[in-house]
């Protein structure tokens, strides 16, 4: 799972300690799509095709069946959701371009190394500056036509070797774009994604249990968005209350701050809301990334009038 904390979390905690009325935000644990899970196992006859758990913490499983000539077959695979990651995002502007820096920390509690980060964008001019592409590191777009999880926008996958981002490790991703920041999605996966063994096709009922990208943990973050009014942009057309609810679910707001913002949303008090964001970020009641979605707040407030 992914947990997101702001880069200024420590500062927020210090402010909260000094001011008892300041309730700091705590970002939520990443949620998977409803009804999606890694394989479940049950007691079966050893000769019956089945999935066995080899290591629950590491998400290591084995498909087992009796092959064409009576030999026992096994394919080992991993459910790539056993990652516990902290992601912080910072945006700056240089020479007319926006620079997005993501700090990826794989917590000690992760069962797998992080083998890939996938960032959603809504811009044509996107360049990954760090880590740099290499012969053994292909940074490319996900195929949304094949994987519906990546059909909205353009998703870039940045792969890592097992040694680069193991449990307890950290890495930085830097992306550059002419597009300003907006709300986007981010996914992470462990692995390896490759299956090992057998040399014979596995039974279809076992293939169906191998987890695909739908189990990759996901989170709300900020990234390049050219036009928040684009019909394909998932936050376009949402009410301010709906946007605030998504942000609150991601843990970007304390409960107290969320309730106060809802009151402002009902009054369509856009200017007052923008001013509140600045104060609350400084006081640790809201995530710093919130500053970068004010144009979406303004858009939703205008359209609701």
Image (cartoon, rainbow, N blue to C red):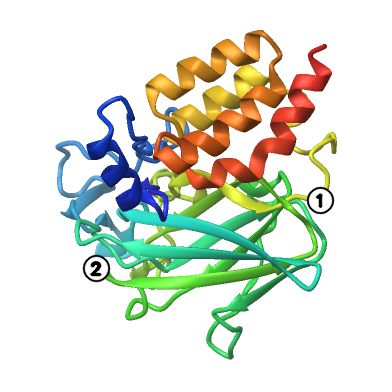
Q: Is residue 130 visible?
A: yes
- The residue nearer to you, when weighing 74 against 60, is 60
Tell me if 246 is positioned left or right of 271 in this view: left
The image quarter containing residue 118 is bottom right
For the residues bearing labels 2 and 1, Cβ distance under 8 angstroms: no
Report the residue marked by disc 1. 226
Direction from residue 283 to residue 73 in the image, left or right: left
Q: Nearer the viewer, residue 50 or 281?
A: 281
Label at residue 168: 2
Query: Looking at the picture, does residue 169 appear above or below residue 289?
Result: below
Quadrant of the frame with the C terminus:
top right
Position of 177 relative to 243 (above/below): below
Q: CA distance from mark 2 to mark 1?
A: 35 Å
What label does residue 279 carry, if any?
Answer: none
Residue 277 point in image, percent of width and height: 56, 34
Helix, strand, or loop for circle 2?
Answer: loop
The tag earlier along the polypeptide, 2 or 1, is 2
Percent from the top left, x then y, of residue 163?
Answer: 32, 80
Residue 227, located in which quarter of the rendered image?
top right
Res 234 seen here: no
Q: Image check: 31 left or right of 78?
A: right
């Amino acid at each position: 799972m992914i947990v997101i904390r702001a880069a200024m979390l420590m500062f927020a905690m210090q402010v909260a300690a000094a001011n008892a009325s300041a309730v700091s935000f705590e970002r939520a644990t990443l949620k998977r799509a409803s009804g999606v899970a890694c394989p479940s196992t049950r007691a079966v006859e050893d000769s019956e095709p089945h999935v066995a758990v080899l290591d629950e913490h590491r998400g290591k499983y084995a498909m087992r069946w009796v092959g064409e000539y009576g030999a026992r077959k096994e394919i080992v695979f991993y459910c790539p959701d056993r990652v516990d990651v902290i992601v912080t995002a910072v945006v700056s502007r240089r020479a007319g371009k926006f620079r997005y820096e993501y700090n990826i920390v794989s917590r000690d509690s992760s069962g797998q190394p992080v083998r890939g980060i996938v960032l959603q964008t809504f811009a044509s001019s996107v360049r990954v500056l760090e880590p740099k592409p290499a012969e053994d590191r292909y940074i490319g777009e996900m195929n949304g036509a094949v994987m519906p999880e990546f059909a909205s926008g353009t998703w870039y996958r940045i792969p890592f070797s097992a040694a680069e981002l193991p449990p307890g490790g950290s890495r930085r991703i830097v992306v550059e774009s002419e597009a300003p920041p907006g709300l986007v999605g981010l996914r992470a996966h462990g692995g390896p994604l490759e299956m090992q063994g057998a040399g014979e096709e596995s039974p279809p009922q076992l293939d169906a249990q191998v987890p695909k990208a739908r189990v990759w943990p996901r989170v709300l973050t900020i990234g390049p968005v050219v036009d928040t009014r684009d019909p394909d942009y998932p936050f376009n057309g949402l009410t301010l209350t709906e946007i605030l609810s998504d942000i609150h679910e991601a843990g970007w707001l304390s409960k107290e701050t969320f309730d106060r913002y809802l009151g402002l949303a009902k009054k369509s008090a856009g200017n007052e809301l923008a001013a509140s964001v600045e104060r609350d970020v400084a006081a640790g009641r809201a995530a710093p990334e919130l500053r970068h979605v004010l144009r979406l707040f303004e858009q939703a407030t205008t359209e609701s009038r």
